[in-house]
Image (cartoon, grey):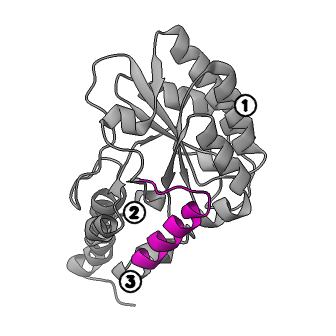
Amino acid sequence: MTTRSFPQACRLPAIAAGATAVAGISYWLGMSPYSQVFGRFPYRGTTTDKTVALTFDDGPNEPYTSMLADLLKSRDVRATFFQVGRAVLRYPEVTRRIVDEGHVVGCHGFTHEFTNYLSRRTLTADVRQGMDALATVGLRPALYRPPWLLRIPSMENVLKAQGLRAVSGEFCHALEVFQPRPEVIANGALAKARPGSIIIFHDGFDGHDGNRASTVAAAEMVIDRLARDGYRFVTVDEMLAIPAYQ
């Protein structure tokens, strides 16, 4: 029976460690909320006032988007919704309500399919379709949030051609997609809340319908707690002093 030499025995762990490092660097560059490598990607405002921007991605998704709209109306809070084009076509009346009640709607692509955000050609098509879907309800946003916050080197030029600029934020909780107890999501969001924060919740599920009851309940907890602490709620365009629409 033969045994591996010391260099051979070390090779596989070294390769695995190298692959892990590359994956980590790739994630940071192209998917981290904080990376600015592929162009300006604001994840918070510069204010020192107690001001936060609550945002909701991947909708509209019923009944949860309407439940959030009811909550926001009851608390006199304005928020920003980054909506998926195919979901807008499914629930156009919900998008209209969101705008009519003073919230801001941004573009979140059309399909929310991961592979459509990996090349300039497919990204361009997806962004155009997303904007076309929003145009059916009379909107031409100036704000875009990439699904999964995924950026590629050509994204900035693709967005410029559509009159858009990219906006980031901080996720309320890493496990929100799995809908843990509302208290878990709320505590994660509150831990990140500070003057200038842009907090990302999800009222939809990749542009599909999906249960977001925990997110709705968590949003209520966050709003009530921050309001008690003296925070004011603004939309992303207000926070960053940029236009909401073209």
Q: Position of residue 158 (x, y in %)?
A: 32, 71
Looking at the image, residue 161 lies above or below residue 246: below
Q: CA distance from mark 3 to mark 1?
A: 39 Å
At x 38%, y 16%, the residue is: 50
Foreground tag (2 vs 3): 3
Under circle 1, the secondary element is helix
Under circle 3, the secondary element is helix
The answer to whether residue 183 is seen in the rendering is no
At x 45%, y 69%, the residue is: 127
Of labels 1 and 2, earlier in sequence is 1
Q: Nearer the viewer, residue 182 or 129?
A: 129
Of the residues shown, which amino acid type is indicated by label 1? Asp
Question: What is the chief secondary structure element of the magenta stretch?
Answer: helix
At x 55%, y 26%, the residue is: 187
Span of residues in magenta: 123-141
Of labels 2 and 3, earlier in sequence is 3
Q: Position of residue 58 (x, y in %)?
A: 59, 55
Neighbour tally class for label 2: few under 14, some 14-19, many 20 plus, Cα within 10 Å: some
Q: CA distance from mark 1 to mark 2?
A: 31 Å
Q: Which residue is mark 2?
A: 150
Q: CA distance from mark 2 to mark 3?
A: 15 Å
Of the residues shown, which amino acid type is indicated by label 3? Arg
Q: Which residue is mark 1?
A: 70
Q: Which residue is mark 3?
A: 121
Q: Position of residue 142 (x, y in %)?
A: 39, 53
